[in-house]
Image: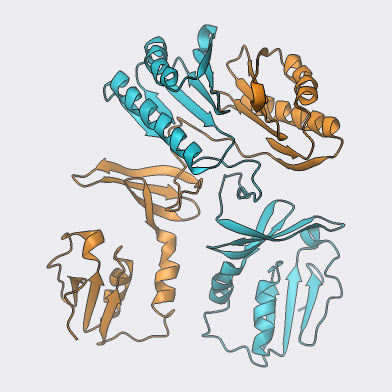
Chain colours: A orange, B cyan
């Protein structure tokens, strides 16, 4: 729960919110913090914990942690956040720049659903099953099942591809409008093998896949099938 | 940063991690908490703040907050987390079930990048511009620009559709393999109007779009164009 106000009055906000925590019988510890505003922590007998951070510039952050993921615990936290939100609105009299409540982060659970993107964004997938999880001599290999994306391949924590990517592969291949029978085909890149996998089904004469040695090393060297060959970047001759 | 151990020894972990925070000259407050383990908070002179939560079952959670999003601040936090991670590994001697570090949540920033899915999952988009943000008499309307998805329409906090969804619309329409010229077309659903928008370009004779009155109310009643009509569910006659 974070709120941005134009005018900061941290002391008033702190006092105004305290009674909400008191109602939940939470034990308070307050730090006033020179030029950095306030930090208050609240611990509950049932093991849940809240931190309230009030920055001098007007940013107010509230975090609530609870151990149990049961329905009663969720209701309690929702209830607390609803009351805090209501009180904040009263205290700021509508003068709130933004009010945002994020879904709970589930940490330490049986299935880890958070797989950040290559550019460092946090994404939670609807993963319902760990299909495979082993360390090879090269990397950790995970296959996780998502309701939305099907099986997802994750290599050392990086999301590589999912069954749902088939649509993209098919689009790249021309959505069925291209006839590959007995044709010579050149794939530039395509390192995950998805395009190659689909295209050999269409009985081409020869598929040549050109991949980056820098990324792939020598694992694909000399990989040759009945109607395909994989050769590293720089080896192709016209 | 969260870690799952099979055997909990909270006291040893707390003591082992304390020196890492001390090195950063952070002020410590510790709560021991009956059957609920430990909570320690650490505040720094520069305004950053950490909480350490050690559950009796062996779950260890660390959260670090800092106000400034500058490079130096990020480096400091990465540095702290690296040291904590290293120390945890030493303390647990490899006996760690899982060790996970999530990307920083940016709260109170100029652009809000977190738009949860309909099923309550946290997703961070690569949004770089707020194109439009207004309240209509019915709802809040946002158009945010994402590098990955193009412009995204968000109605009252719900992600509706993005420019990148055009691929799905085209797939639904048959990827160009269907000829719609002078045909009678029936769209069932399609409430966001994307299919209708694309299909009228293909000069059909008449498109009839049948939508759910329950969801859409009467906003689309009597909406009729040169070659299309939108009628609510239940009004169609064969």
Q: Is residue B203 left or right of residue B124?
A: right
In this rendered view, identify the residue nearer to me: B205 or B36. Answer: B36
Task: Residue B50 in the image: state x and y as whole percent.
Answer: 52, 25
Left or right of residue A112, residue B46 in this image: right
Residue drawn at point x = 78 percent, y = 17 percent? A19
The one of A222 and B61 positioned closer to us in this rendering: B61
Q: Residue at x 56, y 54 (%)?
A: B125
Task: Count all numbered tags in the image, as a single digit.
Answer: 0
Q: Residue furthest bottom?
A: B182
**Picture quadrant of residue A167:** bottom left
| Quadrant in which residue A226 is drawn | bottom left
**Quadrant occupied by the C terminus of chain B:** bottom right
Q: Quadrant of residue A164?
A: bottom left
* In-image side of B201 versus A165 (left or right): right
Q: Position of residue A54 (x, y in %)?
A: 69, 28
Q: Residue at 54% of width from left, 72% of height from top?
A: B167
Up the image or down, A16 lies above or below A198; here it is above
Residue A175 at x, y percent in the picture: 44, 79
User: In this rendering, does residue A234 appear at all?
Assistant: yes
Residue in front for this viewpoint, A200 or B30: B30
Does A5 appear above or below B166?
above
Residue at the (67%, 39%) spot, across then down: A101
Residue situated furthest left in the rendering:
A222
Vertical position of residue B46 compared to residue A182: above or below: above
Q: In the rendering, at what x and y percent does residue A7 appear? A: 79, 36
User: Which corner quadrant holds the N terminus of chain B?
Assistant: top left
């Amino acid at each position: 729960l974070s709120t941005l106000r134009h005018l900061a009055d941290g002391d008033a906000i702190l006092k105004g919110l305290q009674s909400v925590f008191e109602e939940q019988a939470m034990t308070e510890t307050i730090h006033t913090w020179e030029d950095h505003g306030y930090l208050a922590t609240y611990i509950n007998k049932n093991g849940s914990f809240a931190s309230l951070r009030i920055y001098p510039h007007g940013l107010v952050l509230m975090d609530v942690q609870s151990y149990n993921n049961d329905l009663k615990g969720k209701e309690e936290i929702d209830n607390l956040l609803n009351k805090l939100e209501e009180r904040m609105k009263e205290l700021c009299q509508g003068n709130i720049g933004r009010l945002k409540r994020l879904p709970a982060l589930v940490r330490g659970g049986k299935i880890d659903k958070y797989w950040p993107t290559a550019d460092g964004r946090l994404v939670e997938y609807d993963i319902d099953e760990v299909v495979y999880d082993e360390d090879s001599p090269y990397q950790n290999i995970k296959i996780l099942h998502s309701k939305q994306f099907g099986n997802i391949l994750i290599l050392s924590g990086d999301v590589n591809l999912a069954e749902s990517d088939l649509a993209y592969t098919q689009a790249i291949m021309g959505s069925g409008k291209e006839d590959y029978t007995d044709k010579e085909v050149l794939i530039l890149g395509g390192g995950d093998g998805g395009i190659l996998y689909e295209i050999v089904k269409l009985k081409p004469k020869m598929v040549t896949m050109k991949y980056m040695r820098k990324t792939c090393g020598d694992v694909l060297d000399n990989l040759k099938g009945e109607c395909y060959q994989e050769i590293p970047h720089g080896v192709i001759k016209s």
